Structure formats: structure tokens, C-alpha cells
């Protein structure tokens, strides 16, 4: 068995690998960039080595630095996790040449699947079903455009060296062909260093199924069942489950057998995932991910196995722990990816300090987290904070348990998506297995609306807000007390909270320093048995006792009651003039990131909706468009420059003013 292990990754997957390594008695080494100096995965390891600045290309994607860190720390093996260098054949080969064990497949196997073009050609020859399209070596854009027109629309364009949905473009109209190919090539070169593209027939609403395979160096192969990863947004998986529901037995058997054909064809060793599209009748080979998947946890939940332990044993030269007939699948497991993004603002990535991140603690619920309260979410990497996994004997119970667990995940300071995920899990389309890879993109409105704040919740938030100081660490001052004390008479404290565009007015009536009554939006409540502390607020409102989890940060109060989430900001009249002025500002960056394109020039006339600048943040591109027709009168950032959140990017003079 390996004695010391360096994990060439960060976040939740590094923490997860360390957990198994620690159980096996393996010494652990973390690597970190400047952006991750205080990160949780750094604290979780026995030793940590700095490998460079924040930019991934200068740290986590720099194989030479990582190998140097392994040598300096005395590690004998490197686990790449997923993403970054996990599917880089050159890195796997460099580890071998440096005398280090690479916890993954041989470099030749990675190369065999590193190009979707070559992989598709090879698997088609072995009888594995594939989608029609273009998978050739002629890669100039004019040639690709001609093939796109000849193949017929709709088509999907994929980076041949890519994965994770990055760089994919869908072409539905002939007029979109050139722009889609150009964008896909730019993203492919930026993300993978390889601009080769693959064209495939686009299935508008298939399901995304996959099979977990494992192999050792002694020639043994097994599959560990299948998964459904159809719940995606912008080709990024968000909810995954095992086994895949409502797949005919014959199709399931053939798909698992096809996955083993793929693994044997390339002489695979270690953990791998063969991915397919399923149109309801037939499955089609997409690609093989030659690494551990984010969603490996649901396979672990239904098999009772530790796949990272299997990886370490296989990398040490041991045989697979089980033969195919010994693998048992029990129950159903579902995973949700909790990300730093704002569902109310088009899922813009969010970054900054987590004032609160409290994960659920429930039976049959597992959490693989890379962040917690007090940690900082950098803007340099993807937005995944952690994963919540629920197991139950059957699918409906697993979905309900996971939704409940997500409702008991509490975060503040950075926007997160866990309650949006809970709404998806509770939807009829998901529960009735009517979901597909297009569900979240085409039916986003179905899940977008959060439950409105009830009057009872607003009252509880007001009670918590006044009972908890804005800064608990600040010295107590009589001038900061807001208990409405007046001698010998009742007093009323009026408050107005804002939630998005909604306003909520509350009046709390005090007698002898104690709140006795509340009025909110036409309703009146007698207050009794008030308790505030430890992040909980409870009170008898009239005849009913209500309680909730709360958190206060300055003027903002967060309150959670099951599916109801209220993020309320105290409306201070003194800030209104500043807010109105700020709202009239120019074209600003909605998030921190890097400028990847400025398709306009100074003095150019533009139409409303025209793209003025493209910003890349957390591995996604975001277009800044013209809110109205006019003339570009200033450009404050150039291609390649980093922009902080809220920065003025351009100035646009309205057409009438021009």
C-alpha cells in the first residue's frame, strides 16, 4: 500500500481523498495556490506545499511544480482528483518518469480517450453505438462549417480534448454556425490548450447515463452499476443518482457491457466512467472520463464501497477487491452539488467570505465539503463548495431526504444554490423521471421562484434582528441598544425590510422593555415565550409557536424555516440616496473575473443587446450586453485583464444623447 500521497487538487475532492488516506494510515500532502493559502484542504492534510500564484495555469495546472512539491515532501504517489491535470497524459507520464505513482490510468489510456474524435472512431469500430456527425482531422473553421451544414441541424460542437461541458456550443440555425465554432475554439484553446472540435447530432432532450468501471493491472475488469446525471444546467451536472431510474433491463445490461468493452479496448487501469446519451430507446457513446468522477459518491452509497480506497490499492499493484459477481447494489442514492452561484441572477458565480456555511447532519445523509463557515471562496476556480448525498431504500424517499437535507443547509455571505436544488428534487418532473438534460435550461422558471416570506417569518426575523447586535464582537454601548425602552409607557419600533424588490413593514410594540406585540402587513400577533440565541429564534405568535434558524450580518438578517428562505436587509433611509445613485451607474461587472473578449471599439455604434465584453469567471463565460442603442464612449478593461466585482467596464452614450 502507498505510504505517502500528494493530492494535486483542491476543495472538496482533496478533502475527500485525504479522509480515505487517513483511514488507511497514509501520510497526506496538500498543494495550494496563493488564493488557497488558508483553504480547508490545506488544513486537512499532514503537510502542505505552495505551488504558485492564484491563476490555475501557474499552480494547479503546472505539472512541474506539483512533481517538485511531491519530491520535496517525500510523497511517493500523486492523486490528481478530477479536473486540472487528472486527464492529462503528459502529466501521468511525467509522474512515472519522476519515479512517482500516478493514481490513475496509464498515460496511453488517457491519450486514447483524450481526443473525443479518436475515441469516437475507435469505439464505433468496436460496435459501440455512437451519434452521427463529424469526427475528422481537418480542423480549419471553414471545413468544420461546411460539415456542419452538410450534417444537418441541430448540432452540438464539443472541444475534442474537453470535458465537463466546457466550451460546448449548440447550433440550431445556419446563421449561428460561424459564431458557435469560433466561440467553441476560443474556449477549447483557453481551457484545454487544444482547439480541435467535434460535431455531433444534437439530441434536444436525451438523458445522460453513465457506467462506473474499474480495472486492475492484472487484467480484471468490473462495472459498479450505472448512474443518471441528466439534471444539468449549461452542460454542468448538478444532481446525479444511482442506479439510473426507468431504464429497460435489456438496455441497462447492454450499456454496462458496452462500458466494459470500452475499458478493455484501451487497456484501462483504475477508476473510469463511460458516458452515454439515452433517447428512451437506444444509448450512444459520448466519452470516457479517465478519472474519478464528482458523482462517484452515489455509487459508493449503493455499493457500500470506497472507490478512493480501490484506486489506492490498484495503484499499489493489488488486484480488484471484488469480482463482478460479488458486487451488490442496494437502494437508491442521489447527490446534489452545492455551488457558489446566485439562482436569482441567472446563476452568476459568487465569491468572497462565507459568513456562514452550516452543512446538514442527518441519518443516511453524507456531506463531502471543501468549504465551511469563515472560509473564502476564490474567484479563480469553479464554484463547487460541496456535495450532499442521501440514500434510501427507494428513489422517492432518497429525493425527499436529500431535499430536506438541502433545506437544512445554511449559508450567508456568498450566494449559494442549495434551496433551488431542493425545489428541483421536489418537482413532479424529477420525481416522475420526466427529466432530461434540457430540463433546467428550458424550464428554469419552474424552479426559479423561491417561496415568499410569510408574515410570521418576517416577524421572527425582526425579533432576531433587534435581539442580536450587528457585530457581536463590538463592545456594548447604550447608544447601540435598540430595545425601545421608554419609562412608564409602551413604545413601538417600526422596521422596514427589503427582499429583492419586495418591502416588508413590521412594528414591534414594547412594554417595560419586553416585546409584547407585532404588526406585519395587516396582521397582529401577541408575542410570548420569546427565545433568541444560538442561531435560533422562537416565539409564540398568537396561539401558535414558531421557530427558525437565523443569522445576522450587519443590516442583513437571514432566516430559514424549512423550504422558506428569507434574506432581509434593513431599509435604512440614510442609504437610499447612495443606492439610487449607484443603480444609475454604467455597465459594471456582475462578478469578479477576467476579460476574454472585447468585440467593440471606442466610438463604435451598437444596438441594444449587442455583446460589448465577455468575462470569464469560475470557468464560465458571461456576456456584458448593451442595455440600449448608443455609442461606446469608454472601455476601461482590455482582454486578459482581471476585473473586481462591481467594476465599471465600459461607458455607453445613449443614441439620443449622441
Image (cartoon, helix red, strand yellow):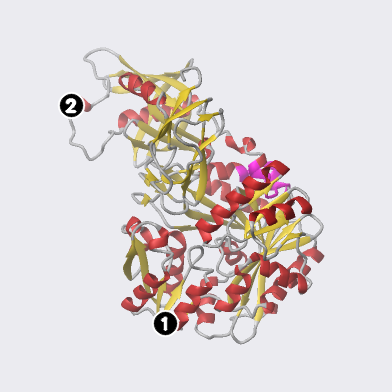
Tally of marks: 2
Residue 506 location in percent, x, y?
41, 20
Of badges 2 and 1, nearer the viewer stands 1
Residue 438 location in percent, x, y?
68, 46
In terms of image quadrants, where is residue 445? Answer: top right
Residue 53 location in percent, x, y?
34, 59
**Residue 295 falls left or right of residue 546:** right
Residue found 35% across the figure and 20% down from its top: 576
Residue 14 in the image: above or below residue 144: below
Residue 491 in the image: above or below residue 332: above
Label 2 vs 1, first from the N-terminus: 1
Residue that carries the numbered disc 2 in the rendered image: 478
Q: Is residue 468 visible?
A: yes
Residue that carries the numbered disc 1 in the rendered image: 98
Residue 98 location in percent, x, y?
42, 82
Q: Secondary structure at mark 1?
A: loop
The magenta-colored residue range is 424-441
**Within 10 Å of the Cα at label 2, are there few (<14), some (14-19), or many (20+) other Cα atoms?**
few
- 39 or 198, nearer to the observer: 198
Amino acid at each position: 500500500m502507498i505510504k505517502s500521497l500528494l493530492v494535486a487538487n483542491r476543495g472538496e475532492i482533496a478533502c475527500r481523498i485525504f479522509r480515505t488516506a487517513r483511514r488507511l494510515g497514509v501520510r497526506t500532502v496538500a498543494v495550494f495556490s496563493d488564493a488557497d493559502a488558508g483553504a480547508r484542504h490545506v488544513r486537512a492534510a499532514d503537510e502542505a506545499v505552495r505551488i504558485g500564484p492564484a491563476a490555475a495555469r501557474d499552480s494547479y495546472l503546472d505539472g512541474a511544480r506539483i512533481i517538485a512539491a511531491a519530491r520535496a515532501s517525500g510523497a511517493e504517489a500523486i492523486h490528481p482528483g478530477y479536473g486540472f491535470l487528472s486527464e492529462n497524459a503528459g502529466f501521468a507520464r511525467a509522474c512515472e518518469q519522476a519515479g512517482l505513482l500516478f493514481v490513475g490510468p496509464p498515460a496511453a489510456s488517457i491519450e486514447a480517450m483524450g481526443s473525443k474524435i479518436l475515441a469516437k472512431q475507435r469505439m464505433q469500430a468496436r460496435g459501440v453505438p455512437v451519434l452521427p456527425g463529424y469526427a475528422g482531422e481537418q480542423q480549419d473553421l471553414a471545413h468544420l462549417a461546411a460539415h456542419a451544414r452538410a450534417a444537418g441541424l441541430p448540432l452540438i460542437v464539443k472541444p475534442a480534448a474537453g470535458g465537463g461541458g466546457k466550451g460546448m456550443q449548440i447550433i440550431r440555425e445556419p446563421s449561428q454556425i460561424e459564431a458557435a465554432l469560433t466561440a467553441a475554439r476560443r474556449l477549447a484553446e483557453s481551457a484545454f490548450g487544444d482547439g480541435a472540435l467535434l460535431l455531433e447530432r444534437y439530441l434536444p432532450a436525451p438523458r445522460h447515463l453513465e457506467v462506473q468501471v474499474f480495472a486492475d493491472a492484472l487484467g480484471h475488469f468490473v462495472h459498479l452499476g450505472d448512474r443518471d446525471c441528466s439534471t444539468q444546467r449549461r452542460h454542468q451536472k448538478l444532481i446525479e443518482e444511482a442506479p439510473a431510474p426507468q431504464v429497460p433491463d435489456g438496455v441497462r445490461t447492454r450499456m454496462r457491457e458496452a462500458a466494459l468493452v470500452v475499458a478493455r479496448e484501451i487497456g484501462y487501469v483504475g477508476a473510469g466512467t463511460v458516458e452515454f446519451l439515452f433517447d428512451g430507446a437506444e444509448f450512444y457513446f459520448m466519452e470516457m472520463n479517465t478519472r474519478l468522477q464528482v458523482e462517484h459518491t452515489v455509487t459508493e452509497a449503493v455499493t457500500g464501497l470506497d472507490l478512493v480506497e480501490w484506486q489506492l490499492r490498484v495503484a499499489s499493484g493489488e488486484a480488484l477487491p471484488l469480482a463482478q459477481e460479488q458486487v451488490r447494489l442496494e437502494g437508491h442514492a442521489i447527490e446534489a452539488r452545492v455551488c457558489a452561484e446566485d439562482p436569482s441572477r441567472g446563476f452568476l458565480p459568487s465569491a468572497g467570505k462565507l459568513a456562514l456555511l452550516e452543512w446538514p447532519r442527518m441519518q443516511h445523509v453524507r456531506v463531502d465539503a471543501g468549504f465551511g463557515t469563515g472560509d473564502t471562496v476564490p474567484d479563480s476556480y469553479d464554484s463547487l463548495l460541496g456535495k450532499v448525498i442521501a440514500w434510501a431504500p427507494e428513489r422517492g424517499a432518497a429525493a425527499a431526504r436529500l431535499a430536506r437535507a438541502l433545506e437544512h443547509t445554511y449559508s450567508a455571505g456568498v450566494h449559494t444554490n442549495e434551496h433551488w436544488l431542493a425545489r428541483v428534487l421536489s418537482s413532479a418532473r424529477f420525481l416522475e423521471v420526466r427529466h432530461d438534460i434540457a430540463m433546467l435550461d428550458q424550464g428554469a422558471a419552474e424552479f426559479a421562484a423561491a417561496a415568499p416570506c410569510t408574515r410570521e417569518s418576517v416577524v421572527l426575523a425582526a425579533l432576531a434582528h433587534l435581539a442580536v447586535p450587528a457585530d457581536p464582537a463590538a463592545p456594548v454601548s447604550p447608544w447601540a441598544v435598540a430595545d425601545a425602552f421608554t419609562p412608564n409607557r409602551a413604545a413601538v419600533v417600526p422596521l422596514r425590510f427589503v427582499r429583492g424588490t419586495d418591502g416588508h413593514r413590521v412594528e414591534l410594540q414594547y412594554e417595560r422593555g419586553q416585546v409584547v406585540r407585532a404588526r406585519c402587513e395587516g396582521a397582529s400577533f401577541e408575542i410570548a415565550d420569546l427565545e433568541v440565541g444560538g442561531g435560533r429564534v422562537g416565539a409564540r405568535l398568537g396561539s401558535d409557536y414558531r421557530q427558525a434558524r437565523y443569522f445576522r450580518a450587519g443590516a442583513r438578517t437571514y432566516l430559514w424555516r424549512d423550504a422558506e428562505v428569507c434574506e432581509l436587509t434593513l431599509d435604512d433611509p440614510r442609504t437610499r440616496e447612495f443606492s439610487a445613485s449607484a443603480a444609475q451607474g454604467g455597465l459594471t461587472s456582475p462578478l469578479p473575473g477576467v476579460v476574454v473578449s472585447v468585440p467593440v471599439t471606442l466610438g463604435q455604434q451598437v444596438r441594444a443587446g449587442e455583446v460589448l465584453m465577455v468575462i470569464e469567471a469560475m470557468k464560465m463565460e458571461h456576456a456584458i450586453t448593451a442595455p440600449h442603442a448608443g455609442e461606446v464612449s469608454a472601455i476601461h478593461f482590455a482582454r486578459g485583464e482581471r476585473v473586481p466585482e462591481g467594476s465599471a467596464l465600459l461607458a455607453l452614450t445613449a443614441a439620443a444623447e449622441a
